[in-house]
Image (tube, rainbow, N blue to C red):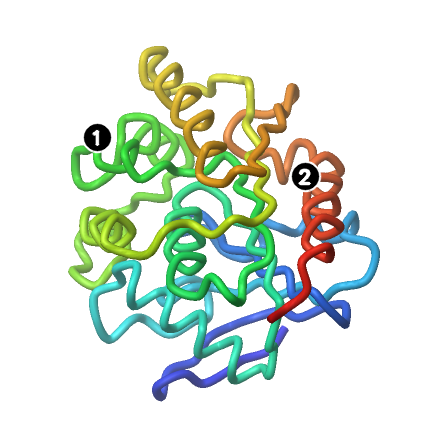
Amino acid sequence: MGFATIDGRRVEYDLSGSGAPVIVLLNGHATPMSSWDKLMPHLAGPGTVLRYNRAGIEASDRPPQRQDGDAIVARLDALLGALSLEGPYVLVAHSLGALYANLYARRYPDRVRGMVLVEAGHPDEALQREAGLGRFARGMTRLLSLGRSSFRNDPHSEFNAVTATVAQIRDASAFPDVPLSVVTGTHRMPLVPRRAFARHREMQCRLVELAPRGRQVLAPASGHFPQLNEPALVAETIGAVVASSRVAPMD
């Protein structure tokens, strides 16, 4: 574990492995980087793995401005620069973190060589909201007590900037033609309405369509957290995308 200073504020991160590509793990809403702990022992092979806590999570300093997609992507890019991680990058994102991976790939298509979305949020799904989150995400937030008042009431929180983030994705360049895998849990978890779960499954299929080389990987023993319930499956999926990403060298 370590700390980097970005614009005068601390960012907590963990770096392991070595070499290319750089595998960047993006957490879900208000979720710490420890949510990837069970995955880490399964990430064997060459490559550098970066996980970090976004602003206001665990030991990372609270944000000085609204945490919309542009702010989060800029901070991530600054962190990669501060750590001298030049890429190529394979982005692995869970839940709401997928919005930021989606935007980063559109902002920096020449740096991203692959993506794995784990129970990811689709921009259209995110806009079906009360307080900025879809019914599926609200159910998960309630279940895990992640949407606690400190995030809901903070005007700078990413919780309150989902609409702006989706608009930024829609205004950005096209999603790059990179290997893409979408890992989808097949179990509906408590507090998630059946209709919302069905809609979520539909949105998972639509995420696959982001890239010509998109594919879906079903996680039969998982709900919203395949990286906890089936870490070997998620690691295998990441490994396949990493292998495919090496076919296209950096320009």
Circle 2 is placed at which residue position?
234
Circle 1 is placed at which residue position?
128
Compared to 49, does 214 lie above or below?
above
Q: Which residue is pictured at 46% across the width and 70% down the height?
A: 59
**Position in image of residue 126 (x %, y %):** 28, 37
Q: CA distance from mark 1 to mark 2?
A: 27 Å
Compared to 72, does 34 lie above or below?
above
Under circle 2, the secondary element is: helix
Under circle 1, the secondary element is: loop
Mark number, residue 237: none
**Position in image of residue 83 (x %, y %):** 58, 82
**Position in image of residue 197 (x %, y %):** 39, 18
Q: Are the residues tagged 1 and 2 within 8 Å (C-beta)?
A: no
Q: Which residue is pictured at 32% across the width and 18% down the height?
A: 196
**Position in image of residue 224 (x %, y %):** 50, 31
Residue 40 left/right relative to 222: right
Disc 2 residue crowd, few under 14, some 14–19, many 20+, Cα 10 Å: many
* Foreground of the two, 157 or 242: 242
* Foreground of the two, 57 or 232: 232
Dot 1 or dot 2: first in sequence order is 1
Mark 1 residue type:
Gln
* Foreground of the two, 170 or 132: 170
Residue 132 left/right relative to 141: left
Q: Which quarter of the picture shows residue 129?
A: top left
Mark 2 residue type:
Val
Residue 139 left/right relative to 85: left
Q: Which quarter of the picture shows residue 172?
A: bottom left
Q: Which residue is pictured at 23% across the width and 54% down the height?
A: 171
Disc 1 residue crowd, few under 14, some 14–19, many 20+, Cα 10 Å: some
